[in-house]
Image (cartoon, grey):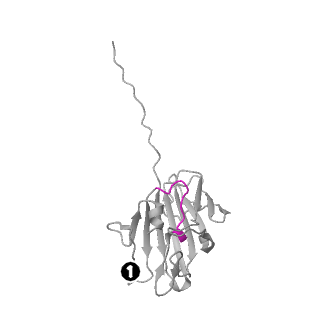
């Protein structure tokens, strides 16, 4: 009797995208946070982004999306050597008051950029001026529906070298003002 060996190909799950936010405030007197979200690798033809309508500890519906301005989307493809190029502008539309839909086509690195007006000084909202910057993650960050359990990195770029960052998020060793949240809920609660 002969023994046979069957070779079964290993099917691996596609890699989960790394979500990285950068929050800049180069002109705090403008009350505008500049936010960039990079997602890579992205393997789907569309990207849904939503702004929360809630905040931890508050049970009212919020209209955080009304403060989002200058939304833009760009993509790069791993198939094309575009590392020196700015990237390809991607078509997008706002499909609901807190929901954006981006046509990503075959782009594998997606960059979303937007500004958030921040001139309301409460614990539920955002505030930025020449004395300080404060943001509530629910009022500043988009989430990807169905991917709220994935880790998120955030880099804060203060407007002046003497500004300090205070957050309960874990710092990433070797990276200045860069932190990691294990999931979206932790990000917006921190």
How far from the left and from the top, in percent, is residue 54?
56, 67
Q: Does 147 sit left or right of 95 as displayed?
A: left
Give the camera-side residue of 16 and 135: 135
Q: Is mark 1 on a helix, strand or loop?
A: loop
Q: In this view, does 10 lie above or below 100?
A: above
Residue 139 colored magenta?
yes
Instruction: Specify the segment rendered in magenta.
Output: 138-149
Q: Does 171 sit left or right of 64 as displayed?
A: left
Please report the residue visible at 46 percent of the width from the left and 44 percent of the height from the top. 13
Our reading of the magenta stretch's main secondary structure is: loop
Give the camera-side residue of 86 and 181: 181
How far from the left and from the top, in percent, is residue 47?
58, 56
Q: Name the residue under label 1.
A: 164
Q: In which quarter of the image is the C terminus?
A: bottom left
How far from the left and from the top, in percent, is residue 179?
39, 67
How far from the left and from the top, in percent, is residue 104?
59, 56
Q: Quadrant of the N terminus?
A: top left
């Amino acid at each position: 009797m002969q023994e046979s060996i069957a070779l079964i190909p290993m099917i691996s799950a596609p890699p989960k995208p790394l979500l990285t936010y950068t929050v800049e405030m180069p002109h705090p007197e403008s009350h505008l946070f500049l936010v960039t979200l990079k997602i890579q690798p992205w393997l789907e033809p569309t990207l849904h982004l939503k702004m929360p309508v809630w905040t931890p500890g508050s049970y009212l519906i919020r209209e955080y999306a009304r403060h989002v301005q200058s939304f833009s989307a760009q993509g790069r493809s791993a198939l094309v050597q575009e590392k020196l190029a700015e990237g390809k502008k991607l078509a997008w539309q706002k499909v609901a008051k807190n929901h954006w839909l981006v046509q990503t086509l075959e782009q594998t690195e997606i960059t979303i950029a937007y500004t958030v007006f921040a001139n309301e000084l409460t614990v539920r909202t955002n505030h930025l001026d020449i004395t300080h910057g404060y943001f509530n993650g629910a009022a500043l960050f988009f989430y990807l529906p169905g991917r709220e359990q994935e880790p998120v990195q955030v880099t804060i770029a203060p407007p002046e070298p003497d500004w300090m960052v205070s957050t309960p998020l874990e710092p990433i060793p070797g990276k200045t003002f860069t932190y990691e949240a294990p999931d979206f809920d932790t990000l917006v609660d921190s």
